[in-house]
């Protein structure tokens, strides 16, 4: 298992190096990119929730947020249930920016998959299917791989 984890780390390093130029072409700070990702995964989050997730104070989160709103990447609205709170969501352009970050990595991997031998590709598919199964939000908390089962277990 350690060699798989090491291989995944090496793969992540390669993908990051390969799409650094793409990431730098978007005129946002790292803090703003983090805010975009938090809002993308938790639409409707408030400013205090965003600050907590980013581990910064509300004024710092508000500063990053203000620029994202000005850029048209984030929509800020009053909570219809509690007008004292603001809810945040990505605009279509904000979703496109977040998608662009994801798509660059996926595209890099996709371009290289075609060079794998069919047996390598099939093995990768089996491993990927297993990883996706155990990483589902509703996946059981215990390992289910054959190698993790006690002897004699089905």
Image (tube, grey):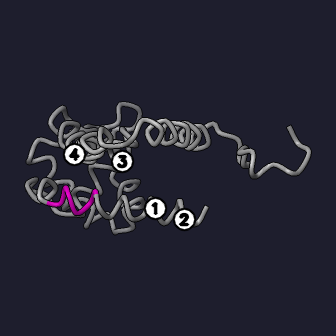
Query: Residue 35 appears at what percent x and percent y?
Result: 28, 54
**Closer to the camera: disc 4 or disc 2?**
2
Q: Earlier in the sequence, mark 1 or mark 3?
A: 1
Q: Earlier in the sequence, mark 1 or mark 4?
A: 1
Q: Secondary structure at mark 4?
A: helix
Predominant SS of the magenta segment = helix
**Neighbours of disc 3 within 10 Å: few (<14), some (14-19), many (20+):** many
- Disc nearest the viewer among 1 and 3: 1
- Tell me the distance, in whole angstroms, between the alpha carbons under discs 2 and 3: 40 Å
> Which numbered marker is on residue 46?
3
Q: Which quadrant would the C terminus be assigned to in this image?
A: top right
- Between 72 and 129, which is closer to the camera in this rendering? 129
Quarter holding the N terminus? bottom right
Classify residue 24 by image quadrant. bottom left
| Location of residue 36 in the rendering, given as x and y in whole percent from the top left corner | 26, 49
Query: Looking at the image, is mark 4 or mark 3 nearer the viewer?
Result: 4
In the foreground, 55 or 78: 55
Above or below, 10 relative to 33: below
Disc 2 marks which residue?
A: 3
- Magenta extent: 15-20
**Mark 1 vs mark 2, CA separation in Å:** 6 Å
Q: Which residue: 20% across, 58% down? A: 18
């Amino acid at each position: 298992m350690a060699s798989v984890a090491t291989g995944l780390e090496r793969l992540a390093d390669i993908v990051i190096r390969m799409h650094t130029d793409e990431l730098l072409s978007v005129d946002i700070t790292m803090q703003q990119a983090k805010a975009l990702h938090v809002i993308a995964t938790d639409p409707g989050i408030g400013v205090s929730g965003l600050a907590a997730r980013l581990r910064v104070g509300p004024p710092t989160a508000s500063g990053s947020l203000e620029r994202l709103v000005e850029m048209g990447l984030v929509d800020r609205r009053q909570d219809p249930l509690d007008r004292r709170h603001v809810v945040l969501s990505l605009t279509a352009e904000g979703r496109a920016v977040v998608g662009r970050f994801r798509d660059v990595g996926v595209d890099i991997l996709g371009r290289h998959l075609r060079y794998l031998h069919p047996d390598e590709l099939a093995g990768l598919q089996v491993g990927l299917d297993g990883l996706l199964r155990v990483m589902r939000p509703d996946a059981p908390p215990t390992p289910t791989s054959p190698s993790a089962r006690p002897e004699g277990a089905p």
